[in-house]
Image (spheres, rainbow, N blue to C red):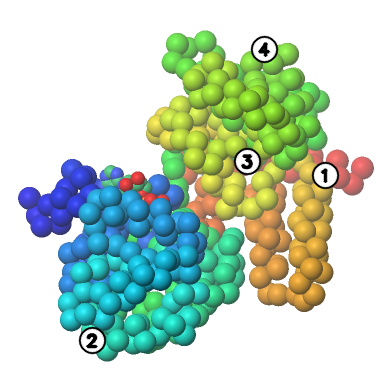
Amino acid sequence: MSAIHRALKEHFGFDRFRSQQQEDAVKAVLKGDRDVFVCMPTGAGKSLVYQLPALLSSGITLVISPLIALIQDQVEHLKALNVPARSINSKLPSAERRQILADLESESPRLKLLYITPEMVASPSFQPCLSSLCSRGLLAYLAVDEAHCVSQWGHDFRPDYLKLGDLRSRLRDVPCVALTATAPQRVQEDIERSLKLRSPLLFATPVFRKNLKYDVIFRDLLPEPYVHLLAFAKEALGGNTAEKGCGIVYCRTRESCEEVAHKLTKLGISAKPYHAGLKAGDRTESQADWMADKVPVIVATISFGMGVDKANVRFVVHWNVAKSLASYYQESGRAGRDGLPSSCRIYYSPKDRDQLGFLIRKEISRKQEKRGSQKEQDKAPIQDFEAMVAFCEQEGCRHATISQFFGNQKPNCAGACDFCRDPKLVRAQLARAAVLSTS
Ligand code: ADP
Ligand code: MG
Ligand code: ZN
C-alpha cells in the first residue's frame, strides 16, 4: 500500500478514493509544483484534495472558506478524526485564540490546517502571524474553498474574496488549490484571474452525462399540455414494469405545483405537491412518500431537491423554464443518478420567458435602488437567463450547449437530445412557435 493510501485509511478511515479524479487531484497537490484548480460537484469529496496533502506535508495549510458556520463544521469534523485543525475567527474565545497564535509562533507548530475567512485573513490583527509564517517558510499550501465567491459572475460573490489576489501575491512560492462546484466557463476564468493562478492543473468532472436525454417542448403549441405531460411521465416511468422509478416536475409558483399535481393525479399518475406554502407536516409527507416510492411524482418549486439524493429518478420536467442554464443543469441533473437512461424535458413557453425575465430585471432594480448604485455584476442574472433562453430556442445539440457553457469540449451526444435525434422536428416546432407569436 502506498503512503497516500495508508494516510487515507489512517486519518480519514477510507479504504479507497471516491474517484480516480479525487486521487489524481490529491497526487497533483502533493507534488506541489503547480497550482491546482478543482471543479467537482457538491459531495464529490473536494475537501480531501487539500486535507490529505496538508497532513502529508511539513508546514501549515491555510484554508480560506466563506462562512464561519461552514468552517466550524469542518474543523469539528477534523478534530473528531484527530487531525490538528483549528480556525481563527471573531467568535473564538480569546484564550483559545492566544493558544493557537502561540502554537503558530512556535518553532515547529503542531497545527496542520488553519481555517479562516477572507475577512480575517485581511484583518490587521492577523498580519503579524501571517508574515511570520511566510518568512519562516511554514506555509505548505493555500487552499481557497468555494472559490466561485471570488468571481463577480459567481452566484454568491463576496468583495472580500477579491483581496485574496493580494494574499496570493505575497505567498508567491506557496502552491494554491482553488475548489468549487461545477461552474460556468466565465466563472472559472474569473477565479483563475482573481487568484492569480499560474497555469493551474485542472481537475473537472465532465458535465456530459450520456444517460440523460434532453428535449424542449413548446407548451403553447400543445392542445392538451397535461395529457402530453402524462404521456411523457408514463413513458419515462416505463409503463407497468416491476422496477419502480419516479420523477420530479419543477414549477415556478405554488399555484402551478398544486394545479399540475392535481391534474396528473386525476389523469392517472399519482403526484404530490411540494412548496413553501404547505404546512411543514404536509411538505415532509410529500417528500417522504416520494422518497419511499409510494408516490411516483413530486411536483415542486426549486426549493425541493437540495440534499435529495435519489438514484431512480427517471425524469425531471421543468414546467416553467429555469432561471439560468447553470441551475437547469443542476436541477435536471437529479435524474439518472443510477446511470440508467432518464429524461429531462422543458415545457417551454415564450410567455413564461417574458414573465421570468421581467421578474429577474425587477429584482435587479430593487437591489440597485437599495444600494443606490449599479454594478457590473448586476448583469449576471440576465446573462445567465439569456443562456437558458438560448438553450430552449436554439437549433443545435442541447448537450453541446451545456458542455460548452461549463467550458467542456463538445460531447458525442449520439442522439441523446431532440436536435441530434431529429433536427427537422426541432426546426418545425420553432417555425410553428414563430407563427404563433406573430398571430
Ligand atoms: P465537497 O466539498 O466536494 O462537496 P466534501 O469534501 O464535503 O465534498 O465530501 C463529501 C463527503 O464525502 C464527506 O462526507 C466526505 O467524508 C466523503 N468522502 C470524501 N472522500 C471520500 C472517500 N475517498 N471515500 C468515502 N467518502 C469520502
Ligand atoms: Mg466543499
Ligand atoms: Zn445532441
Mark 2 and mark 1 lie on one chain; the one further toward the N terminus is 2
Which residue lies under the disc numbered 4? Answer: 268
Marks 2/1: CA–CA distance: 63 Å
Marks 4/1: CA–CA distance: 28 Å
Which residue lies under the disc numbered 1? Answer: 351
Taking the spot 76% from the left edge, 56% from the top edge, the residue there is 360
Assign the C terminus to one quadrant of the image.
top right
Q: What amino acid does circle 1 point to?
A: Lys
Question: Residue 246: x and y, percent?
Answer: 53, 24
Residue 169 located left or right of residue 139: right
Number of numbered discs overlaid on the protein picture: 4
Residue 303 is tagged as: 3
| Element type where label 1 sits in the image | helix
Pick the residue in front: 425 or 341. Answer: 341
Question: Residue 372: x and y, percent?
Answer: 80, 75
Mark 2 and mark 4 lie on one chain; the one further toward the N terminus is 2
| Element type where label 3 sits in the image | loop
How many neighbours does mark 1 have within 10 angstroms: few (below 14), some (14-19), or many (20 or more)? few
Q: Quadrant of residue 232?
A: top right
Label 1 CB less than 8 angstroms from ligand 3? no
Marks 1/3: CA–CA distance: 23 Å
